[in-house]
Amino acid sequence: MQPGLAATVTLIVGDADTAIAIGSGDVAVLATPRVVALAEQATCAAIADALGGGQTSVGSEVQLTHLAPTPVGMEVSADAVLDSVDGRKLVFKVTVNDPRGLIAAGYVTRVLVDRTRFMEKAES
């Protein structure tokens, strides 16, 4: 796993992605929890091809500032770049944009784990 791995994911904001639908507010714009999920999706895509057999990553920390609203029907894109690697800890710089510009930015930290052991621990 090396810094520089990157990916972009996109979403057309739908009614199910709004603060009203998710319960994080009472306006029909892209919900902050959905922005976080999109950013995490981009981090997963960035390292998908670099994971070893039986290996996955789990989210451990999100530091994201949601800067601007995005209405239903508009496309948003989340970009993630692996910024640093410290053992199993992966820190990604993330940005989220709509056609008008930057709507969110920050960092997402993920941890590499053995999928089987992780699930055994979760279920015990």
Image: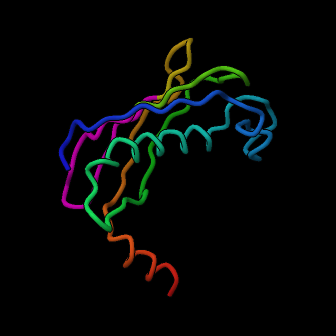
Image x and y of residue 28, in percent: 78, 30
Above-or-below relation of 37 to 113 = above
Which residue is nearer to you in this view: 48 or 59?
Answer: 48
Location of residue 107 (image quadrant): top left
Is residue 94 part of the magenta span, yes or no?
Answer: yes
Q: Quadrant of residue 94?
A: top left
6 or 25, nearer to the observer:
6
User: In front here: 109 or 4?
Assistant: 4
Q: Position of residue 25 (x, y in %)?
A: 76, 40
Which residue is drawn at the image coordinates 18% and 45% (left, top)? 2
Kindly identify the residue that appears in the image at 62 percent across and 38 percent down. Answer: 32
Q: Where residue 66 sits in the image (x, y, percent)? A: 55, 32
In the image, residue 30 sits, relative to residue 70, either above or below, namely below
Residue sitting nearer the eye, 63 or 42: 42
Residue 80 in percent (x, y) is at 37, 35
Span colored in magenta: 80-95
Horizontal placement of 118 versus 32: left or right? left
